[in-house]
Image (spheres, helix red, strand yellow):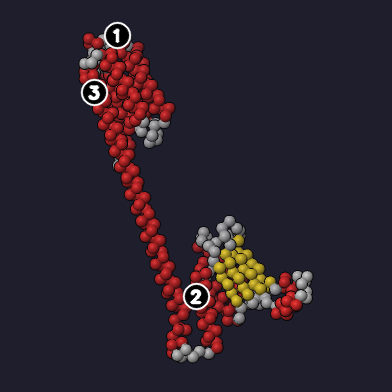
Amino acid sequence: MRVSLPAGIAIGLAALFSLFHLVLGVASFGVVREVGPVLTCMALYAAASAVAIFLPGRTLPVWAACFCLATALVMPVIAAPVVDLADKNDSTTWWIAAIGTLMVVLVVRGRRAFAWVGVVFVTLFGVAWGGPGAFGELGLVGNLTWVAVATGFAVAMARATRTTQEFLRAEQETADWQAAQDAHVFERQFRLSQTTRMALPMLQRVIEQDGDLTDAERAECLHLEQAIRDEIRGRALLSDDVRDEVMRLRRRGATVQLHDDGGLDDLEMDDLRRVHAEVADALRRARGADNVIVRTVGEGSEAAVTIVGLRLDTAASESAALGAGADDDDDEDDSVVLWTEIPRRAAV
């Protein structure tokens, strides 16, 4: 939200006032002593007004403000000598009001210091040229008043804009905080419902049998506990197929570790489904592994997920403990039964 006058209306009004001063300059041709200086002032004023009004941007560039100020300083010096003080009127002194209008435009375009220098100069020049009475007769009071009003309006608008931006920023921060809280509540409810869905049948069986479980049921409880941990540590890695394959491996006696380090957060839904399907397929091929580790890879890598399957060789482990075969790497190579890297993007 910005409190401001529509740009089209503001530009139209400024151009209309500037054109009115040029019309007064044309009307003074029959009154002034020479037309040449008046034409020069009109050309300078038209160029400065066009630059100040139509130059794009909210704040006028310094070079444009300097050009407008230079025009305001030069116009009185050029136009005053051809005006007869005994026969001065609104048409012959059009350049005084024109400078005031130009300085108001500078204030609106964010160059208040330049505007005040220009209006103070034309005021002092007018008093020195026309005497103390010229302060009211030539419209110098009106120039000062309009520039002062424009300055106050510009300051008030700037303050209102800053206040509005602060409110918008506070509103955005509040919305972000509320979204984070909602996400936290949703995540907690989702995890609770997921845990309940997985553990409720086994909990009911424990209650029905009064805790007297068979060895197979106790092992299943451990598998369920590991599955619940997977929901926390391997969230982005999980799909229904992945969960089924992980449970089959654990029921066979293998150890499965899932680690989601945030490497899949930037994937599109199609790529994420493809990664889940390839993870499930790799787990199907890891039936001979005793220890399977599935870990996401951080952003910046071509791979999204790395899967390693190891076969534990009891005989080799005992030999290594006794110091035999320490230089033989064949056993170590044979212990790796699966090594798969799933790409982040599908191959074209």
Which one is earlier in the sequence, the residue at label 1 or at label 2?
1
Q: How many numbered tags mark residues here?
A: 3
- Do the CB atoms of the residues marked 1 and 2 lie less than 8 Å apart? no
The residue depicted at 60 percent of the width and 81 percent of the height is 252
On screen, residue 348 versus residue 157, left or right, reads right
Q: Is residue 38 visible?
A: no
* Residue closest to the eye, 93 or 50: 93
**Which quarter of the rendered picture does the C terminus lie within?**
bottom right
- Residue 159 at what x, y percent from top left? 31, 41
Which one is earlier in the sequence, the residue at label 3 or at label 2?
3
- Residue 169 at what x, y percent from top left? 36, 50
* Residue closest to the eye, 301 or 318: 318
Residue holding disc 3: 141
How crowded pointer 3 is (Cα within 10 Å; few <14, some 14-19, many 20+) is rated as: few
Residue holding disc 2: 228
**Label 2 element class:** helix
How crowded pointer 1 is (Cα within 10 Å; few <14, some 14-19, many 20+) is rated as: some
Mark 3 residue type: Val
The residue depicted at 31 percent of the width and 23 percent of the height is 119
**Label 3 element class:** helix
Residue holding disc 1: 33
**Label 1 element class:** loop
The residue depicted at 25 percent of the width and 13 percent of the height is 130
